[in-house]
Amino acid sequence: MGAESNIEEIKKKLEEELAKLEHEYKYELPKQIAEARELGDLKENAEYHAARERMSYVKAKMAQIVDKLSRLNDINFDDIPTDRVGFGSTVVIQDVETGEEMTFTFVSREEIDPMVGKITLATPYGKALIDKKEGDEVEVSTPAGTRKFIVKSITTIHSQNK
């Protein structure tokens, strides 16, 4: 499955979560607040305060999801290079000193999983590798120091979707 379809799957999940939260925010929570108001004294009304607190949380969560969806919708697959490292690329690099090989796939923030090599272009490796081609040598500045690598292979998002 290519990165483009992964993005669509993530967007679908976010849209479903947003719909549930919107329903809760517009219908369920106002009903809970109204019922709690009927109980009287709002200063010591735990149900009222819990519902108001939940309402604030849900509103903030909805804003986060809208922001994530906006960022995902801004990804233009036509602008991603076909022959160099870019979003969606899977890159194999080899440490010049040790010969150790590492593989990374550059994904959106919603897909990050460093344990399987899924990172963003905003990481030190992403910043060093963006726009590089096979055979290029790169230096990566990490907290552990600077390391030199050779780009062994690149599979772009375009070749993954074929």
Image (cartoon, rainbow, N blue to C red):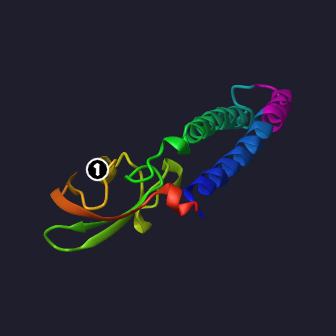
- Could you tell me which quadrant the C terminus lies in? bottom right
Residue appearing at x 71%, y 44% in the figure? 15
Q: Quadrant of residue 103?
A: bottom left
> Is 79 above or below relative to 133?
above
Residue 120 percent across, percent down from the top left: 41, 51
Residue 71 percent across, percent down from the top left: 55, 38
Q: Residues within 10 Å of mark 1 (few under 14, many from 20)?
A: some
Tally the numbered discs.
1
Residue 160 percent across, percent down from the top left: 53, 62
Residue appearing at x 17%, y 59% in the figure? 147
Q: Main secondary structure of the magenta part?
A: helix
Report the front residue among 82 and 76: 82
Report the front residue among 151 and 120: 151
Residue appearing at x 60%, y 64% in the figure? 1
> Is 120 above or below relative to 26?
below
Report the front residue among 38 and 15: 15
Q: Secondary structure at mark 1?
A: helix
Residue appearing at x 65%, y 34% in the figure? 53
Residue 84 percent across, percent down from the top left: 37, 52
Q: Is residue 28 magenta?
A: yes
Q: Quadrant of residue 101?
A: bottom left
> Is 155 above or below relative to 125?
below
Query: Where does label 1 land, which residue?
Result: 124
Q: Is residue 96 magenta?
A: no
Over which residues does the magenta segment extend? Answer: 26-41
Looking at the image, residue 96 sits to the left or right of residue 32; the answer is left
Looking at the image, residue 105 sits to the left or right of residue 135; the answer is right
Q: Amino acid at mark 1?
A: Pro
